[in-house]
Image (spheres, rainbow, N blue to C red):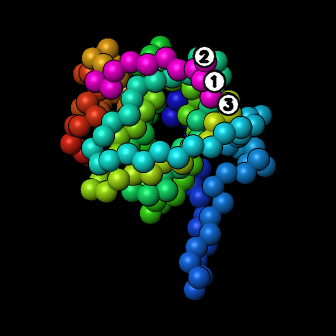
Amino acid sequence: MLPGVMIKPLRRSFDERGSFMEVIRADWGDLIGDDRILQANLSMTYPGIVRAWHRHERGQVDYFVAVRGALKICAYDEASGELDEIVAAERDPSVIRVPGRYWHGFKAIGDEPAILLYFVNRLYDYGDPDEARRPWNDPAIVPRSINGNAADPRVGRPWDWFAPPHR
């Protein structure tokens, strides 16, 4: 994984009433470190829609949790060419930490809308947003490795959010 990108599995407890799950806690030092969560956001995305690419240049860190459906979350380091691709889904809950310095985004996968709950360590500034953007299909995003694998058949080509799954 890119430095700072982390996946923390979440534990859901079930009983006859339903379920309960802690999503993020200030005492999860292994995940949060010195960050202080200042804002929570909820996003609904229709199947097949891509929301990418953007990054935060003033220190924002994002914490993503798929609460409904499934998402392919990607983080790309322009300097190294490393791309991390993570599938997050409600059936296997986890929180994904993405430092904002990486170009990142996601695609709703599956046949139902995906709901993403995400937490950030900086308040959104309406007058001066901490967001740099590029198109979701920017041909300049060409991974040199994917999840640390330089032999992945998608390496060396512009990133294709719609490439079929492979093994």
Give the farthest residue toward the left.
164
Secondary structure under tag 3 reads loop
Q: Nearer the viewer, residue 60 or 83?
A: 60
| Circle 3 residues within 10 Å: few <14, some 14–19, many ≥20 | few
Q: Position of residue 51 (x, y in %)?
A: 38, 34
What residue does disc 1 label? Answer: 125
Q: Is-magenta flag for residue 6?
A: no
Q: Nearer the viewer, residue 31 or 23?
A: 23
Horizontal and vertical percent position of residue 129:
58, 20
Cα separation between marks 3 and 2 = 11 Å
Location of mark 3 (residue) = 123
The residue depicted at 47 percent of the width and 13 percent of the height is 79
Viewer-proximal residue among 133 and 26: 133
Under circle 2, the secondary element is loop
Residue 138 found in image quarter = top left
Residue 8 in picture, x, y percent from top left: 59, 50
Disc number placed over residue 40 in the picture, else none? none
| Amino acid identity at mark 3 | Leu
Are the residues tagged 2 and 1 within 8 Å (C-beta)? yes
Residue at image position (27%, 56%) is: 111
Task: Please tell me whether residue 104 is drawn above or below residue 110 in the rendered image.
Answer: above
Where are the magenta residues, as a range?
A: 124-137
Mark 2, Cα crowd under 10 Å, few <14 / some 14-19 / many 20+, is few
Q: Are marks 3 and 2 in contact (CB under 8 Å)?
A: no
Question: How far is mark 1 from mark 3, CA to CA?
Answer: 6 Å
Q: Amino acid at mark 1?
A: Asp
* Residue, disc 2: 128
Q: Is residue 62 left or right of residue 134?
A: right
